[in-house]
Amino acid sequence: MGQTFGDLLRCCCCNSCTPASRWRLKSLIRNTTPLTPTPLRLAFLSLTASPTLAACGPGERSVSFVNQCVQQVWIGVTGGAGDACGAKNSCPTGQACNTNNNTCYYTLGTPAAGGYGLAAKTGTAEFCVPAQTGATQWSGNVFGRTGCDASGNNCQTGECGGSPCPPGQGGNPPVTQAEFTLQTTASDFYDVEIINGFNLPMEMKPTGGAPYKSVPDNPYTCGNPGGVTPLNDTLTGCTWTFDTTVGGTDYASYLRMVAPADPQTACTADSDCSGGALCGLVQQGASLSRMCGSEIGWWSGDQVCGVDPTFGAPFNCGQAVPAANGAFGTVANLFGCVLDKTGKPAAQSCYTDGASDTCCGCPNWPYPTDDGKTCQAINSAWTTSVQPWVSFLKNACPTAYSYPYDDKTSTFTCQSQAATNAVDYTITYCPG
């Protein structure tokens, strides 16, 4: 029997899910029907902004947001799952009940300062995460929603079906996500993730709250994934600039996400478009096609194959993977690091000691890993069919999670000196 949506959120948001679980969770989130958005050109500008912090109470953790983009951004939240809820059992403080499945999910609740809609260039907000008696204080992910109406709905990216996202439901990918689990007496885990594509540059970083626990020098300890500043001499900052040339060919029309123009016009290149429109990929239901429109983000090969497992060139999602390279079945499964078996079990990570060449991965990125370990094996089919598209993402942001087993260069931890973890965080849209 497969895992439910709540089960997947519970394990994945606590940093304990398998790649199969992560892939299925993202598939559930992305396989909702998007609306057809109105055109809006996505632009980024880095400006200096600092949140006006409220005073969070004892034991609470501050999570602040800063919008440095040239457009308004609405905060999206996908909370991890907790206990069952219903008429006779309400959710604990800091969680809300989704009555569709009677499950509690972490929420950020009402901001202590600001609101969910962040004004262009200067918008800020702060949330006070309630103290908890259990091991986990908060778990889930946050993202940015763009091109929304005045109420923060009907968005071009991060859309939730024309309404506020209910507890536990994420917005339609592609969206950039900051994923984090805040723990009461242990290290927090956090990352910036673009496995399923990109809609906004994002950075997550600790911003005080308490002195950090003393640890050996490690860029993945209390660092800032998604930030533009290098973490050391070899772990560079993110340019958030996407080079669409893969293998010597420009695939911009397949990688660019656009809001289609009105009237809709099919295209194969920018030269087919007029009025400043660009050629890119558009999702309509379960199908993908190239149309002229305004740029609103970038697709990943993993997300394209998740929407349409039969999508052809250049991703070749339905292409067979040789049995000698593992029981993946198709390239779509190879993107997700899952096997072509009942329940889509996880493939072996190529970072695992004793891994064979039927594992999933593995790129020896030109960046340090969190523990110094490099690939223990390499799957040639993955290197040929998947790595070029993963590199498209990773080159734009070396500290971002770019494929399901990218933990070694993407997972960050932080803990305060005191027995109770009290580190606060700031998430910035369009950092710089």
Image (cartoon, rainbow, N blue to C red):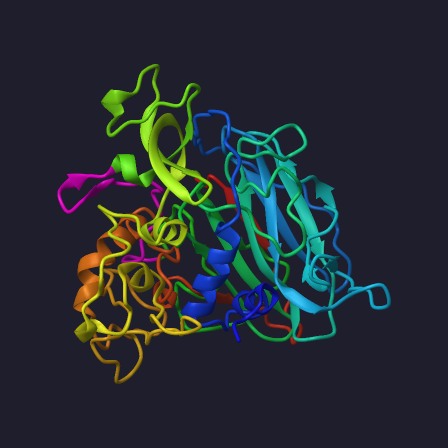
Q: Nearer the viewer, residue 410 or 143?
A: 143
Direction top: furthest residue: 275
Determine the residue positioned at 45% across, 34% down.
Answer: 46
Residue 204 visible in this rendered orientation of the protein: no
Asked if residue 288 lies in the magenta stretch, the reply is no
Main SS, magenta region, reads: loop
Q: x and y percent of residue 24 in the render? A: 46, 63
Residue 356, by quadrant, is bottom left
**Apparent side of residue 135 relative to residue 352 in the rendered image (left or right):** right
Q: x and y percent of residue 188 in the render? A: 55, 67
Direction left: furthest residue: 248
**Apparent side of residue 409 relative to residue 69 in the rendered image (left or right):** left
Classify 276 as above or below 334: above
Q: Nearer the viewer, residue 286 or 275?
A: 286
**Apparent side of residue 178 relative to residue 81 in the rendered image (left or right):** left
Determine the residue positioned at 42% across, 19% down.
Answer: 263
Direction bottom: furthest residue: 354
Q: Nearer the viewer, residue 199 or 372?
A: 199
**Apparent side of residue 133 relative to residue 283 in the rendered image (left or right):** right
Q: x and y percent of residue 360 in the render? A: 29, 70
Determine the residue positioned at 34% across, 67% down.
Answer: 337
Residue 406, by quadrant, is bottom left
Looking at the image, how many numbered discs can be counted on the residues?
Answer: 0
Q: x and y percent of residue 370 in the render? A: 36, 69
Asked if residue 248 lies in the magenta stretch, the reply is yes
Residue 320 visible in this rendered orientation of the protein: yes
What range is drawn magenta here? 232-251
Q: Quadrant of the C terminus?
A: top left
Residue 91, by quadrant, is bottom right
Classify 24 as above or below 163: below
Classify 332 as above or below 280: below
